[in-house]
Amino acid sequence: MNKEKYLELRNGLYTEAENLINEGKLQEGQSKMQEIQDLDNKFENEAKALANLNALRDNTKINPAAPVNKENNKIGDVASEDFSNTVEYRKAFMNYVTKGTPITGEFKNAAGPTKTTDVGEMIPETVLSRIIEKMEATGMILPLVTRTSYKGGLTIPTSTVKPTASWVAEGVTSEKQKKSLGGSITFAYHKLRCAISNSLEVDVMALPVFETTFVNNVVEAMTKALEQSIINGSGTGQPKGILTETVASGQNIDVAKAAKLDYNVLISAEAALPLAYENGAVWFMTKKTFMSFIGIVDTNGQPIARVNYGINGSSERTLLGRRVILNDYMTSYDPTGATTHVFAFLFNPTDYVLNSNLNMTIKRYEDNDTDDMITKALMLVDGKVVDVNSLVTLTKKNV
């Protein structure tokens, strides 16, 4: 019974039951209501049976991503984009990385003009998805920034001019204003490379262990490189970092060489943050710098730095009620003032856009000195601050 037939029968029974009840024939109406329930159960059981049948149809022993070619009774061209998720391809991929066994046959994409020897082998989608997931889960900064994934260059228009409203008398018009885009921010692609050395022991590892090891190695290296560039990347051959941007006028707070951290330093930083950018701005600093704030109290003797522990036991650090994000990519506060350095900054991380293409490819080569097999992973990424007005820096001077 299809859905249309079911609805037609059900609506008819419902109308009959309604008419019987309106006519005072309650017993006959109850009988029709029972028929409706029986029809619902029948339709539900048929739907379940059909779903189970479809599951059996899709549970073929032949790789569904590589359909059988009826002419030669062999597995032919791959028709599904998700074929790399299959256990067969994942095992073939593991053998390629650990033993150098070429991936051939139904798993080789040879339809395009690009030579397969030029691009290496494609990382299975299962492994790639886990890499992305763990990078988001373990990074302190990556989950906070704005993530995009556009192919080609991404351009974001910018404008510093906004129209203004004016009070007018009755019958008087206002000045017509023009909204113009003063510039744009264009994202290029920079190559991020991670090389992994696999020793002889990897040859005998089971597939899940291999995938976990590969994921953990790539995650640690990629996460550190990406977050390092988000904080202080040069913008040449890599994303441009937050601290390499020019701070808006009046939004840098200097701490003299002879001066110490005190309550007024944070008050000045909060005052320099524009009201329009207050929501979402957080502190960024190293753990050592945060510990320098622990002993500071306000004018009432209350500590300005707090560490709370949630239900799950994780630490939640705040300065004057504002969240603190710790990282190891900055210079810690040096009370001696040996060099001029930015030791902390306020910023709304959503004002930083990280545009990446996560379709990684790998290549493999042998280190002749150690006989280790080197596997290198590549990705293309770029990042920039799209609105610098939420940035307030604290700088320790050496004079």
Image (cartoon, helix red, strand yellow):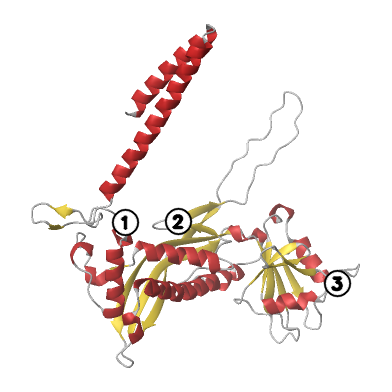
User: Mark 3 packing: few (<14 Cα in 10 Å), some, or many (20+)?
Assistant: some
The residue lying at 32 percent from left, 81 percent from top is 204
Total numbered labels placed on residues in the image: 3
Looking at the image, tell me whether mark 1 or mark 3 is earlier in sequence order. Answer: 1
Q: In this rendering, is residue 73 above or below 96?
A: above
Q: CA distance from mark 1 to mark 3?
A: 58 Å
Can you tell which of label 1 and label 3 is closer to the viewer? 1
Along the viewing direction, whichever of 153 and 162 lies nearer the viewer: 153
Q: Are marks 2 and 3 in contact (CB under 8 Å)?
A: no
Q: Quadrant of residue 174?
A: top right
Q: Which mark is residue 154?
A: 2
For label 1, the residue is: 82
Q: Position of residue 70 (x, y in %)?
A: 11, 51
Can residue 204 be seen in this snapshot?
A: yes
Q: Judge depth for marks 1 and 2 and give the one in front.
A: 1
Q: As displayed, is residue 15 above or below residue 117?
A: above
- Distance from disc 1 to disc 2, alpha carbons, whole Å, reads 27 Å
Q: Which residue reaches farthest front?
A: 27
Of the numbered discs 1 and 2, the one sitting upstream in the chain is 1
- Which residue matches tag 3? 297
Separation of residues labelled 2 and 3 (CA atoms): 46 Å
- SS for callout 3: loop
Q: Residues within 10 Å of mark 2 (few under 14, many from 20)?
A: some
